[in-house]
Image: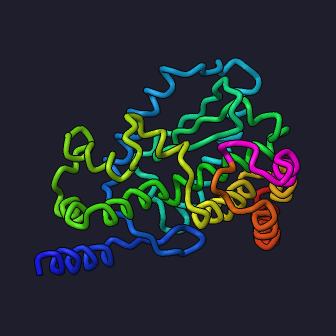
Amino acid sequence: MRKVIIIMLSLAFAVTACEKVPLTGRKQLILVPNNDMLSMSFTQYKAFLDTSKVISTSNADAEMVSRVGDRIRRAVESYMNSNGYGKRLEGFKWEYHLVQSGQVNAWCMPGGKIVVYSGILPYTQNEAGLATVLGHEVSHAIAEHGNERMSEGLVANGLLQAGQVAAGIATSAKSPQTQALFQQAIGTGGPLMYQYFGALPHSRNQESEADHLGLIFMSMAGYDPAEAITFWQRMAKAGGGKAPAEFLSDHPSDERRIADLKKILPDAQKYYASARR
């Protein structure tokens, strides 16, 4: 009976904790307080940068990362503030860094903390290609995919714990209780949250959603969305039918991704046309 009550209470809370993803309108479960997500993200982002080969902003490629990232940021902020989603950006402290690494990868933590690995630049080739990548990764943060996965993990690994979060127990990001809850949600046992936020694979649905949002955001930033198709075609060719790097792990198939983007392209072109006026 106790388990039944816990399940019923947790499910009732889950219903009240549903939010909608911008643009797509998909309902999602969000349980973890935003302040906790940002606190953990900022701490671990700094830890990552402190132990990585960060390329100086005076470098041309690093400057390009900052320039493209800033244009994506302005587009995101414009859309979110104009469509009633401004609250999702509260506490964001945007940063863009290029890191020396052969990995063909990039990621964005909650709060706008972005890393691009130098290994992906031969594939992006130009600013529009990089905008495709950054638009996609920023969209994960905007759609709160990290919080969603944590929330689902909390429910899956202990419904009572989800209820405890709901009741405000152990919501400080510095508390041992919250650390334990976060680590349980991650399921890796690793000490750094960036392993969860940036490196671990997202669900395919979330990846497709990030493709959708990313295409719109890059278009609003003034980058031709047709270039996103070209970029993913390059990635597919480089992979020879297989994902060439972590950036593509657990993503939709190349064929499905490109087909889906082509369906969204006409809508994205409207945003692009408006941005060019």
- Front residue of this view, candidates 86 and 194: 194
Q: Residue at x 53, y 47 (%)?
A: 200
Is 267 colored magenta in this rendering? no
By what rule are the colours in the image chosen?
Answer: rainbow
What x and y, as percent, mark residue 264? 76, 71
Q: Residue at x 48, y 28 (%)?
A: 48
* Image quarter in which the C terminus is found: bottom right
What x and y, as percent, mark residue 215? 72, 59
Is 242 colored magenta in this rendering? yes
Residue 270: in sight, yes or no?
no
From the viewer's perspective, is 139 left or right of 196?
Answer: right
Dominant SS in magenta:
helix
From the viewer's perspective, is 9 left or right of 20?
Answer: left
* Image quarter in which the N terminus is found: bottom left
Q: Residue at x 65, y 51 (%)?
A: 249
Residue 141: in sight, yes or no?
yes
What x and y, as percent, mark residue 179? 27, 42
Q: Is residue 41 above or below residue 137?
A: above
Quarter location, residue 61: top right
From the viewer's perspective, is 218 left or right of 192?
Answer: right
Q: Residue at x 57, y 51 (%)?
A: 201
Q: Is residue 75 above or below residue 212?
A: above
Q: Residue furthest left?
A: 2
Quarter location, residue 92: top left
Residue span colored magenta: 232-247
From the viewer's perspective, is 108 left or right of 256?
Answer: left
What x and y, as percent, mark residue 69? 65, 41
